Amino acid sequence: MKRWLPTISLVIVTGIIVYLMVYIDVRSRAKQAYLEGEKYWTWAEQPELKKKALEEKFIKEKLKLDRQLQKGKITKVDYEKKIEILKYEQERELEESAIKYAYYWYQTAVELFSPPETKWVRLAREKMHVAKEKWKNELRQKGIPFEDYMIE
């Protein structure tokens, strides 16, 4: 029996360590998804923040392209094409529903990162239903027909 004790102890300790690593990883991913949902929730309530954030993102990406052009890593034609793509992406993101993305991020936290039932999963579950109702109201206001199964 004494020969098995170190092996059994090692297996138990390894199991506990693996469980803790998985728990910490899932918890941090749930937190990240919840916070991303919060960002979109804020954008839905304050569209000027969304516009500002997307403008900052555009400027940052444009500066990267400017540096690549200066270093000769891309041609002027490629630069102009990529700028047009950036402008298109910015316009598309401005038109997208922020509350829709909030709902999806909350749903991600709940469905992909539970169990365990962490603080972040509970918060996401609470806000997920409210975000879904806000999204439905937004669709109704825009006159976009939908069925519940379409937004799951």
Image: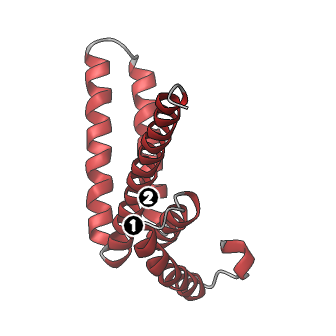
Q: Outermost residue toward the front?
A: 1
Quadrant in the picture for residue 123: bottom left
Residue 17 drawn at (x, y percent): 42, 40
Q: Residue at left 39%, top 26%?
A: 79
49, above or below 127, in the image: above
Which amino acid lies under the numbered mark 2 shown in the image of this protein? Answer: Ala
147, above or below 72, in the image: below
Q: Which mark is residue 149?
A: none
Q: Earlier in the sequence, mark 2 or mark 1?
A: 2
Q: Are marks 2 and 1 in contact (CB under 8 Å)?
A: yes
- Along the viewing direction, whichever of 128 and 143 lies nearer the viewer: 128
Image check: 151 left or right of 107? right
46, above or below 134, in the image: above
Crowding at dot 1, Cα within 10 Å, few <14 / some 14-19 / many 20+, comes out as many
Residue 86 drawn at (x, y percent): 42, 42
Q: Outermost residue toward the top?
A: 72
20, above or below 39, in the image: above
Gap in angstroms between the C-alphas marked 2 and 1: 6 Å
Residue 84 drawn at (x, y percent): 44, 40
**Label 1 SS:** helix
Which amino acid lies under the numbered mark 1 shown in the image of this protein? Answer: Trp
Which corner quadrant holds the C terminus?
bottom right
Image check: 147 left or right of 39? right
**Label 2 SS:** helix
Q: Which mark is residue 120?
A: 1
Crowding at dot 2, Cα within 10 Å, few <14 / some 14-19 / many 20+, comes out as many
Which corner quadrant holds the N terminus?
top right
Q: How is the image coloured?
A: secondary structure
Residue 62 drawn at (x, y percent): 30, 36
User: Which residue is tagged 2?
Assistant: 30
